[in-house]
Image: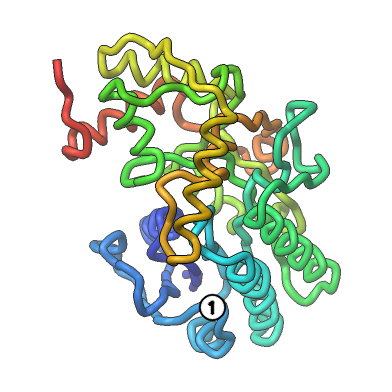
Amino acid sequence: MKNVLVTGASGFVGSNLCAELYSHGYNVRALHRATSNLSSLNGIKIDLHKGDVTDKESIRKAAQGIDTIYHIAAVFREAKHPDSYYFDVNTKGTQNIIEIAEELGIEKVIHCSTTGVHGHVKNPPANEETAFAPRDVYQISKCQAEDLINKAIERGKIKAAIVRPAMIWGPGDKRIFKLFKGIGLGILPIIGNGKTWTHWIMIDDLVRAFRLVGEKNEAMGNTFIIAGDRPVTMSYVYERICKFFGKKPPFLKVPVLPIWIAGAICELICLPLGMEPPLHRRRVDFYTKNRIFDVRKSNLILDFKPSRTFEEEVEYLASWYVQNNWIEVTA
C-alpha cells in the first residue's frame, strides 16, 4: 500500500485529492497549516501533520516514509497579499518540496500548476508545449515553480510530473459559487462581450487525473493539461446556468474598462489595510482571457477522459448548490 503526502490538504483541491486517494486504498498524510480549517477533511481517515511548505523542517517531518508527494499547496489570486508572498509559497515552497524529496529519496513528486501559465491563449488551442505567457504575479510564480520541477527531473534524483488544471469547479467550491448565485438571482451581468472562451474541469475528474499521474510510470517526466469536455464561451456558461434556474439569459453586458478601473481603485484602498478587495483587476481577467486547451496528451498517456459533458457539469453543480441550501431557488 502506497504512502502519500498531500500538501495544501485542507484546500478545495487538496481535500478532494485526499478523499480520492484514501478511497483507492492509499495511506494518506495531510500537510496543513496550524490555522487551516480542517472541516473539509472530516470523514477521511488520514494522518494530519501541521506544517507549511515555507518551513523545510515541517516538510521533512511529514515526508518520512512517504512514497509520493502530491504538491497542491499554493497561494491563489488574492489581491490582499504582497507579491513576495506568492514567490515565498508558490516558488520557494516548491523548491523546499523538491529538496526534501531528493534528500529523503522519495519516489515521485506530482506538482499542481495551472493552465494560467499560458495566460491569454492567442492561438488556440494551447497544449503542454505552448510558451508561457503569464499575466500576473500568481501565474509568474507558478511558471517559476514549473521550472524548478523540470530542473529536478533533469537532475534525475526524483521522478516528477506536472499537472496543469483548467478552470476548476465542483461541489463545495466557494469561488465559482458566486457565479452560480449571481446568475441564479438574475443580478450578475456579463463583463465584456461574452465571447471569451472558457475551459473547465470538474473537481472529481481533476483529482482522478492526479491519481492516474501518480500511478502511471509513463507519466513521469511529463506535463499534463487536465480539462473537461470542451471549451465554451462565457455567454454559453451564463445561458446554461440560467436554463437550470429557469431564468432568461442576461442581456446586460458591462464594458470591461470601467470595471477594471473600479477594481484598481478597490485595490488602492484595501491593500494598505490588508483587506481582500471586493473587486480587483485579476477577477476581470476571468471575463476577458481566452482559455482553450488541447487535452490529447492526457487522453493518450493517462487514458483520462472527463466523466460528464459541460452541460451535465453545470446541472450537477447547480443541483448540489441548491440541495445543500447554498442557493435558494425562487419562482
In this view of the protein, which residue sits in the foreground, 64 or 264? 264
| Identity of the residue drawn at 30% across and 59% down | 40
Image location of residue 194, percent across then percent down? 54, 18
Q: Quadrant of residue 84?
A: bottom right
Image location of residue 203, percent across then percent down? 44, 43
Q: Quadrant of residue 54?
A: bottom right
SS under mark 1: loop
Question: Does residue 244 appear to the left or right of 201 in the view shown?
Answer: left
Q: Is residue 4 above or below residue 325?
A: below
| Identity of the residue drawn at 38% across and 64% down | 10
In this view of the protein, which residue sits in the foreground, 33 or 294? 33
Q: Amino acid at mark 1?
A: Ile
Q: Is residue 262 above or below residue 70?
A: above
Q: Is residue 328 above or below residue 46?
A: above
| Identity of the residue drawn at 49% across and 65% down | 272
Count of marks, rendered view = 1
> Quick check: can you spot residue 313?
yes
Q: Is residue 278 above or below residue 319?
A: below
Image location of residue 315, percent across then percent down? 33, 24
* Crowd band around label 1 with a 10 angstrom C-alpha radius: few (<14), some (14–19), many (20+): many
> Quick check: can you spot residue 291?
no
Say which residue label 1 marks: 66
Image location of residue 78, percent across then percent down? 50, 56
Question: Does residue 59 appear to the left or right of 27 in the view shown?
Answer: right
